[in-house]
Each structure stands twice: as structure tokens, then as C-alpha cells.
Image (cartoon, rainbow, N blue to C red):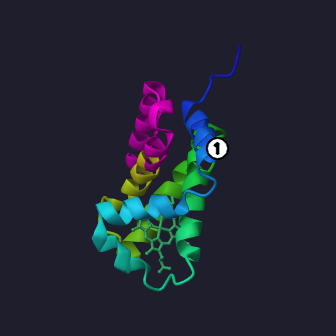
Amino acid sequence: MAEERSHILDSLALWGEVHADPTDSVYALLFSRYPELESLFVMDTDGGVRGSMLQQAFECIMDHVGEKQIAYSLVSTSRILHEGYGVPAGRFDDFFGVIRDSCRADLADKWSDAMDMEWNDMLETFRGLL
Ligand code: HEM
């Protein structure tokens, strides 16, 4: 049986074609939506924390569409760790939503309903991990 195609992977591949490094636009969207979060990163003068965060979020996404070995424990342990970083309850998961929305904005008319559905399912799955 042919392996099922991942629309999330398709969206990330297309995103890579239009945007070599989406870090700045992801954080610009995050801080425009939730300005109160920007002050949490004052110590991150070289952007290293922001870069690692985005990288780990992508690792969770890739693992979710692939092996499903690390994503779920990583999301739930990171969520608890972030309570200690002062991230307001519920905001942790919004980072994945901001990544989805940045990707969707950059893909414009290349974004499909199938991508939308698969991203929504993943966001629901992550949100449900406690
Ligand atoms: C809006 C949601 C989020 C906010 C506001 C946020 C905020 C932060 C802050 C302030 C730190 C620095 C903590 C410190 O060093 O004292 C941090 C670190 C980190 N965050 Fe997030 N975070 C969010 C979501 C996420 C998500 C969804 C992931 C990945 C699944 C993630 C992964 C990480 C990692 C890996 C670090 C450590 C980075 C390093 O020190 O190199 N974060 N986060």
C-alpha cells in the first residue's frame, strides 16, 4: 500500500521554497498577536533561544508526521517547563498556530484545504497532550 502523503510536509516544502528562513516572520507574527510575550525574550540578545525554540517546534512537527517517537513527550514536558518560564497558560500551544499561520500566509494560493485540515488535526493533538 502506498504511504499516505503528508500535506503538512508538502506545505513545509513549499514554504522552504518561498522563505529560506522563516524565523523573523514567525516571531514578528507571534509578537504582533501577543505583544506581552516579547518581554519574555529580553535576555535572548542574539536570538539563540528563539532559533532553538522554532527548531524544536519543527522537530515536533516532523516527528508527528513521521515516526511519532518524540513529539508527544517533548510537547508535554516542554509545556510544563514553559510554565516556569512565565509563559501564560494556553499560550504555549499558540506557537504552533503562529507557525501554521505564517506558513499559510507565505504560501498564499498554494495553501490547500487538505493542508488546513492536517495542520488543524496536529494542533488539536498537541493541544490535547498534557
Ligand atoms: C508562545 C509560546 C512560547 C513562548 C512565549 C515561549 C517562551 C520561551 C522563553 C521565554 C524561553 C527562554 C527560557 C529561559 O531561558 O529562561 C523559551 C525557551 C525554549 N522554548 Fe519556548 N516558548 C513558547 C513555545 C515553545 C514551543 C511550542 C516549543 C517547542 C515545542 C518551545 C521550545 C523551547 C526550547 C527548546 C527552549 C530552550 C531554548 C534554548 O535555551 O536554547 N517553546 N521559550
Left or right position of 55 against 108: right
In the image, 36 versus 105, the foreground residue is 105
Q: Is the residue 16 above or below the residue 32 in the image?
A: above
What's under tag 1, amino acid-wise? Glu
Left or right position of 100 against 39: right
Left or right position of 59 against 97: right
Q: Is the residue 47 above or below the residue 27 in the image?
A: below
| Quarter occupied by residue 108 | top left
Can residue 125 be seen in the rendering of this structure? yes
Secondary structure state at the residue bearing disc 1: helix
Quadrant occupied by the N terminus = top right
**Extent of the magenta region:** 102-130
The residue furthest top is: 1
Most frequent secondary structure within the magenta stretch: helix
Q: Is the residue 118 above or below the residue 59 in the image?
A: above
Does the segment drawn in magenta span residue 124?
yes
Can residue 68 be seen in the rendering of this structure? no
In the image, 13 versus 124, the foreground residue is 13
| Quarter occupied by residue 124 | top left
Q: Residue at x 45, y 50 (%)?
A: 102
Left or right position of 21 against 114: right
Ligand 1 within 8 A of label 1's CB? no
> x and y percent of residue 6 in the render?
59, 30
> x and y percent of residue 4 in the render?
63, 22
In the image, 77 versus 39, the foreground residue is 39
Q: Residue at x 55, y 36 (%)?
A: 8
> x and y percent of residue 76 in the render?
46, 57
Q: Dot 1, how many residues are within 10 Å of its Cα: few (below 14), some (14-19), or many (20+)?
A: few
| Quarter occupied by residue 34 | bottom left
Q: Residue at x 61, y 58 (%)?
A: 21
| Pointer 1 residue | 17
> x and y percent of residue 128 in the render?
38, 45
